[in-house]
Amino acid sequence: MTTKEITNNTVKKHSVILHNIFQNIRDQRKLIIIIAFLHLISVPVLLITMAYNVTSGINNAPDEGYALLTVGLTAGAGLLGIAAAMSSFRYLYKKSEVDMALSLPISRKNKFLSDFVSGLSVYIIPFIAVQVISVILMLIFHLTIDGRTYAISRYGLEVSYKCTLFGDIVKPYFELLFGGILIMVMLYALTVFIMTCCGSLFESILYTVLVNGMIPALIFSFSYSLIDNLYGVMAMYKVKNFLYFTSPAGALIGLIENISSGIDGIRNTPIIFLLLGMLVFTALVTSASYFIYMKRRAEYVGRPFVFKILYYFTISSIIISVALPAENFLKNNNEAAFFPVLILTAIVYLALEMAANRGLKGIWKGALRYVLTIGLAFGFSFLFTKTEGFGTVRNIPSANSIRKVSLSLSDEQPYTMPVQMKSLFFKLDYLDEAGFMVFEDRESIQIITDIHEGYMSVYKQIVREHGDVIENYDPSYEYHYYPITIAYYYKNGGTAVRRYSVISIEGIQTLLKLFDTESYKKNLTDYYVNTTKKEYLNAVDLNKTNGDYNPKLQIWNHGFFNSIISPVYTDNIISEYNILDYPLSLYEELSAAYAGDLAEKGSGIYDEGLDYNFKIFYLLGINYIFDDSYHRTVGVMDKYGLLDGIEFDKEIVFDEKNMKKQLALSNVSILSYDDFVNITNQNKVSDFSSHMLHSEQTNKNSSEKLKYLYENSEDLLTLLEVSRTQYITDDKCYTIIVNGIVAVIPAEYNSIAQRVYNSAREYDSTEYEKGLADGLFDTNEENYIQ
Amino acid sequence: MMDLKGVTLQFDDFTALDNINLHIEKGSAFGLLGSNGAGKSTVLRLLSGVYKAKSGNVLVDGEEVFDNVNAKKKIFFINDETVQFGGMTLKELKEFYKGYYESFSGELFDSLNDVIKLPVNKKMDKFSKGMKRQAIVITGIAAQTDYLLLDEAFDGLDPTMRIIVKRMLVDAMIDRKLTTVISSHNLKEINEVCDSAALLHQGKILFNRDLDSIKGNVHKIQAAFKGEMTKENFTDMEVLHFERRQSITYMIVKGDLEFIKNNINEKKPDILDIIPLTLEEIFIYEMEGMGYDYKGNN
């Protein structure tokens, strides 16, 4: 064959393939119109409505019902992928078409590929075209995509401009768009696969519906019935990769979870993996379809199944999906679970057998298969439970195999470690979007696996006391309740998530070690020296632009508890306060010193009390709280004269002669445990600030309040000395809040705390009644709390 | 030429074709005869590459047909269905096949349609069955392939149209040595168009012969003898059918007419008549001779 002939043949081959594609598309023009129409009346119409409302100034939000309808219409058009596949490959189930289709001079390979492409084009191209129209509409009317934000409020439509082409919405929008296309391709590919396995239209449609539903149903059934019962194992994480990558419905769940907040805040399947997973699924299913297509024979058309494995898979999945949850449910509610499940599943199974065999033919074989299936399902369930998910429960990952760990601690006890810890780690940028603390250094990972080890010890103890395997046992009745979620991200790309609710106080104290790691110390320095420096410089630049910034420091002698040193604007300077220059070098030295002090203290910070003479250096929203033990910080402050005249000691603080200095007292509160836990009771909180409010509003001298403070000064000072800003306990304690700084009073001082609390409340109540009688207070509780 | 060599095809437990051997000469018009379910359509599907033989070879010009584009380019298969074209107009049908067959001639298609005058822009689901058959036959001819396979080709055509369509086929065979394979259970049609034929029965080829030789080789004898004659008296001839009605003996005999005449004359018949047989009768008696009951009792 000459080169010219080879070229001609290639061209001809391509022209036949293209002809086949265009011919198929042409045959399905009605379907294209329907799909395009459904897409057109969904998103574009919604956008036009929005645009009309924006441009015409009608402050009516688009009908929420229509927004829902948009979702429904898009979903409806999405489901028409089944019709596109059915139409493109109709000769696989339609006897009248098979001769014409397969006698054409086109190879089976090219026939498959071109039919696949044409059906996909019929399905996808209208969607893409309409999305292009939608983007154009968004750009024309400045809706969402170009930075103009559009919001619906109680006042109607609100539009604001960011003046940035392609705003924040663009990334998730295109992720959703691209993911949506891939899910559509998955649905189409799966339908083609099912069609190649079936020989009749009835089975093709029925099994497309069943398989699309049964894959996620089987996974959910397995997850709910078996994995959910495993101690500490979070079922959804265990099965999510099976769910996301095995069916279009699962992929849709994955996409929605990825674009929203993930599962319980853990978004551990990056969008790129999700999209790649969809592509891999499509590639595998399409390859399987191609393989079966090439193997299947024309004479199979008309049979219910060409490859019965699809039927066996589906029917078994249905039985397992029904049997396992039913058994689980009945077992939890009714001891005699076995026979109802058996009867229910037998009816379902035999009904499907009769449908597939078009009658009672082979019913005995079917019955035998049923017995085998149900036997395997229950056998597996038994084995899985007895082996604790084949060892999953007790498996603790090796720190070496972990790339990163994210940790979530319960907020159940507000003043205990979890909240404080979270706050500290948040400051240092350890937290991800969902509020999980993320650790990537080997030292921290090892600490967390050790904690995990501790949880397992508790679990093993429970197992020893309550039997080999715990099912539906709630250990929180017997143990302290500190829910913790640990998400391991393996180096090999896998993930494992555990959630435990039981641990001893010693167990959770182990977490303190996270404050002694090199990584933590480094992050402290980074945060104080680099991150906040950047913020400082930005603020200076911004204020320079505004022309009203003077880099000066203002020192507020803020009552007897602390001093506040903060940057000041020129026109805000109050002459009676100390005003200092505020050079960058001061800031840099101070930040480094403070970070050094914190690093040195590490977890020891939990042993420190709320010193009555602590200071706050306040800068750009960040509090640098320190006392004399912060020797580096104090050194720098001293060097720059920042501490001049703001030292107080116990005697000075409660010396009646110095009472004027305490005028700045703004907020000292003592809270009982119940006050703190139950936010609705906060109006009963003994809040010293209310006295201030009262005295200010009545224009009275504050001597009455100060007298009260003085009378209780010994108790207050004791409480301040013993209170801890960082504290771990599971006792019920009082809490003291000074100028927003929360400290816990250890339980052994409950009697003193109670005395002060009661006294304060009594005083408070009297003052409040007085205020009410004078008509001074707004009876609105919210205002009173302020 | 087309060849089926030792071809067997099974549908589950049912053997549709059992070790079939068939040779179709290039340029010939070949008829496939047989009752319903004999395997005629199956042979055509094998020859057109729709089916794949379980064993044996299906060759067109020496090449395997199944999934072989080069071989399939030479073949146009018209099956006994017409509903698949319902959504198309005649014009679209032409364009449809034009894209697949390089040799397709639009001019020829148009000229053939000038004869049968089918509406070009009307959806074919509005056509009668006969009109659809005409449409697909002219499409097959216009494809100008070397081989045209027709399954029950004349089904649904009125007598006039049958003549026209047959004429078109014959013209194509004469003009460009088109090889035609026609399946039918109507012997008359095969007789009119084909020069050779094979008879299929229950997945086997009972015979495969030149039609003229078939017609010239089987004879119906009507004779009266003085004595009582039985089939055993004629063992030196190949008697396909023997029957006595009173004194008249009826025989269907295969072989050279002169030899048969001489043989019977040796038995001194009072009457000897040679009656011409229709092709249908020949086939029925041939099958009977091979042990098959034409009434369907095997």
Image (spheres, coloured by chain):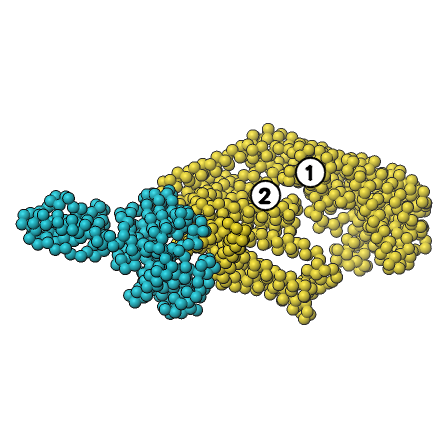
> Disc 2 designates what residue?
A241
Image colour assigned to chain A: yellow
Q: Which mark is residue A544?
A: none
Q: Nearer the viewer, residue A543 or A503?
A: A543
User: Is disc 2 surrounded by few (<14), some (14 to 19) or many (20+) residues within 10 Å?
Assistant: some
B263, B34: nearer the viewer:
B263
At horizontal 74% and vertical 43% (from top left) the residue drawn is: A430
Colour cyan, chain: B
- At 84% from the left and 53% from the top, the residue drawn is A539
The furthest residue to the top:
A464
Type of amino acid at the residue the image marks with label 2: Asn
Three-letter residue code for mark 1: Arg
If you read the primary sequence from the N terminus, does the residue marked by circle 1 or circle 2 appear first?
2
- Image mark 2: chain: A
Instruction: Find residue A75 and report its horizontal and vertical position in percent.
Output: 55, 57
Return the x and y of residue A723 as percentages of the image width and height.
Answer: 81, 39
Could you say where residue A318 lies in the image, as x and y percent from the top left?
Answer: 47, 45
